[in-house]
Image (tube, grey):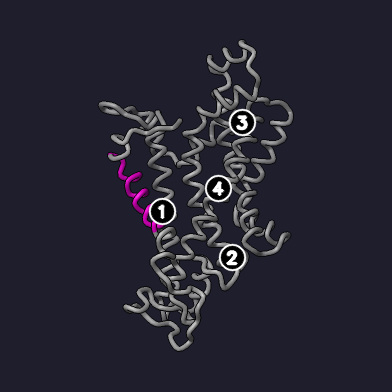
Amino acid sequence: MLIIPWSQVRTNFRVIASLAIIGFFVLIAIAGPVVLTRDPLTQDLSKALLGFSSEHPLGTDPLGRDILSRMIYGTRLSLIIALVVTLSSAALGVSIGLVTGYTGGAVDLLLMRVIDTMIAFPGLLLALTVISVLGPGLENMMLAIVIYTIPVFVRVSRGVTLRVKSAGYVEAAKALGCAPSHILLHHILPNSISSIVVQLTIEMGAVLLMSSGLSFLGLGVQRPTPEWGLMLSDGRQYLRTAPHVPLVPGLAIMVIVLGFNLLGDGLRDLLDPTLQTNGRGSQEGARSRRLPKQVRELTQPHSQS
């Protein structure tokens, strides 16, 4: 079980700031629709492109719909998309990575070449290719992002498996006659949790950003459903005359993605022993801190492919 002492959490500014940001949006998603009774789909062309007011705190869009109501419902949808897609990708990717990393052989080599190709392929282009085959829509967009995200979790879990499977306690479990499934679930997976959790939080921000981008292009969530990327697309032509229409959803996307990235970086610092310093600190930990967040997790598995 992954437990981080509160004494370490409260001294990490990035974790505290990210929890405040994410908690704010989660609170809006849960309590917003209960408190706010205005229908986000109701149109009133006589009130189109109104600015901030007591009646419409964030103004109205080109069709006279209340932007605050649409933002609240869009928050719920965006968080659900990010959570479902990321958890689905993690479940599939981690399972594949654990099995292939533990068994090895020709299947592992072939699969990792496929994974390398998918990782090298531009994410947005891969998603566009999948959607062009399946057609636009929420479900197809989520499936496309899952396909793109799975290789990242395969790489991370496989890398940890390659390092852990030669450990003494794993060899002892083999000597006692434990089944491979038991070793994977009770010895290797628990030692992979920290890396998986860090990658999970970072990928949630990336998934949210990609889903908003695909909706912006008209390939994800379809009108009139309130979604941040779609709202940004609808308001981009009013950037000069009514800048609040595109800026509000754009700022929301930026802030929540920043929150997930800060959380991933903060958890990495707390869970990665190479970043723990005492006294004057270690030079290796300092050098590791300066590496991009994906390099330390992906380089080692890549070298053992």
Question: Can you identify the residue that label 3 sits on?
Answer: 98
Q: Earlier in the sequence, mark 4 or mark 1?
A: 4
The three-letter amino acid code for the residue at tag 4 is: Thr
Q: Position of residue 219 (x, y in %)?
A: 62, 65
Provide the residue designation for mark 4: 86
Residue drawn at point x = 43 percent, y = 58 percent: 30
Which residue occupies the extreme left position in the image? 279
Please say if the residues under marks 3 and 2 sit with CB atoms less than 8 Å apart.
no
Q: Quadrant of the C terminus?
A: top right
Is residue 287 visible in the rendered image? The answer is no
Upstream in sequence: badge 1 or badge 3: 3
Q: Earlier in the sequence, mark 1 or mark 2?
A: 2
Residue 258 shows which numbered tag?
Answer: 1
Question: In this rendering, would 195 be left or right of 152?
Answer: left
Question: Few, some or many C-alpha atoms within 10 Å of disc 1 (few <14, some 14-19, many ≥20)?
Answer: some
Amino acid at dot 1: Leu
Q: CA distance from mark 4 to mark 2?
A: 17 Å
Q: Are marks 3 and 4 in contact (CB under 8 Å)?
A: no
Task: Quote the CA–CA distance across marks 3 and 2.
Answer: 33 Å
Q: Nearer the viewer, residue 59 or 167?
A: 59
Q: Which residues are magenta?
A: 11-27
Which residue corresponds to the image point at 37% horizontal and 34% vertical from the top-left? Answer: 4
